[in-house]
């Protein structure tokens, strides 16, 4: 029995009948993407009733555009719901997380706690900001699907370029294909370099093992070249 199957068997033994799997479409530190089939194939084989949620908070505005063959979307009938944050890669104002689910599921979130809001607690009501929704709409309309695809394609090229440099220098890193994040082993990064380039640590204390570079619009090849040079200065064996 695999690890996952053991976990499920344990949960069933404790009386759990239904499962919700949250599959990540880009983790925050590594950008790593889960293959939902790892879970759904097993659930199907075991005859388990489940829902599958896709956490696309970070990668939702990247991965589907860079990996156009990806089926991590509502195209996959097993996907019940998706979250996607416009305040990450889309650079919309904070508080623009988006939750989308299949018809018939949103009713499960209508809680008694929100009864003071008149009508169904489904859309803009209470103190939710309509300005945020308008901002997201405007950003999306300004890029258009082709403009956004182009932007993501450029970021992919720059990310691959940084990886090529790191390969050359011999610095270990993690990069999920089709994502714009490169996570570098902290052993190879001096504090001075981390500070100079504002690298984001996994942990904000001495136990930190990773620094990440998120390649965005303002992170151009010339900046990445400076970083690669600084990292190279710490690897004496390279020549
Ligand atoms: C940012 C993030 C969240 C949390 O989203 P917020 O809407 O900013 O609270 C959840 N999952 C992942 C992978 C994230 O990157």
Image (cartoon, rainbow, N blue to C red):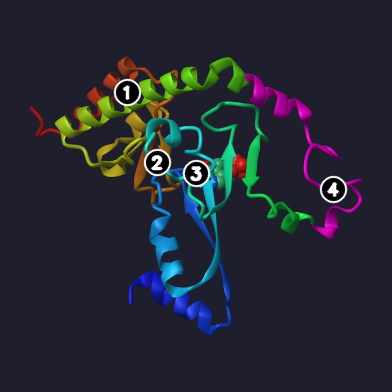
Q: Which residue is mark 4?
A: 120
Q: Position of residue 157 (x, y in %)?
A: 31, 23
Q: Ligand 1 shows up in which quadrant of the image?
A: top right
Residue 206, percent from left and from top: 39, 49
Give the left or right position of residue 166, taking residue 56 as reference. left
**Residue segment shown in magenta:** 111-138
Q: Which residue is mark 3?
A: 73
Where 36 falls versus 93 (above or below)?
below
Q: Would you call the spot at circle 4 few (<14 residues within 10 Å), some (14-19), or many (20 or more)?
A: few
Disc 1 and disc 3 in contact, CB within 8 angstroms: no
148 is within the stretch colored magenta: no
Mark 1: secondary structure: helix
Which residue does the numbered mark 2 point to in the structure image?
70
Residue 125 visible in the displayed image: yes
Which of discs 4 and 1 lies nearer the camera? The answer is 4
Asked whether, in this view, residue 128 is left or right of residue 16, the answer is right
In this rendering, which labeled residue sits more in front, label 2 or label 1?
A: 2
Asked whether mark 4 lies closer than 8 Å to ligand 1, one says no
Q: Secondary structure at mark 3?
A: loop
Image quadrant containing the C terminus? top left
The part of the image, by quadrant, that contains residue 200 is: top left
């Amino acid at each position: 029995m695999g690890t996952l199957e053991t976990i499920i068997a344990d949960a069933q033994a404790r009386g759990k009948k239904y499962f919700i799997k949250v599959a990540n479409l880009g983790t925050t530190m590594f950008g790593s993407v889960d293959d939902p089939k790892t879970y759904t194939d097993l659930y199907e084989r075991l005859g388990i009733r489940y829902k599958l949620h896709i956490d696309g908070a970070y990668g939702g505005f990247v991965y589907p555009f860079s990996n156009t063959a990806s089926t991590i979307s509502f195209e996959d009938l097993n996907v019940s719901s998706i979250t996607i944050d416009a305040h990450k890669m889309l650079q919309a104002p904070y508080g623009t997380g988006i939750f989308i689910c299949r018809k018939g599921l949103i009713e499960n979130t209508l809680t008694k706690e929100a009864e003071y809001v008149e009508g169904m607690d489904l859309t803009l009501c209470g103190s939710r900001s309509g300005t945020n929704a308008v901002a997201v709409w405007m950003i999306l309309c300004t890029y258009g699907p082709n403009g956004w695809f182009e932007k993501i394609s450029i970021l992919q090229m720059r990310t691959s370029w940084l990886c090529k440099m790191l390969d050359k220098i011999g610095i270990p890193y993690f990069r999920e294909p089709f994502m714009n994040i490169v996570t570098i082993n902290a052993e190879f990064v001096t504090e001075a370099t981390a500070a100079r380039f504002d690298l984001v640590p996994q942990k904000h204390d001495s136990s930190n093992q990773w620094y990440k570079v998120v390649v965005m619009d303002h992170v151009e090849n010339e900046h990445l070249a400076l970083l690669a040079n600084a990292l190279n200065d710490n690897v004496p064996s390279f020549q």
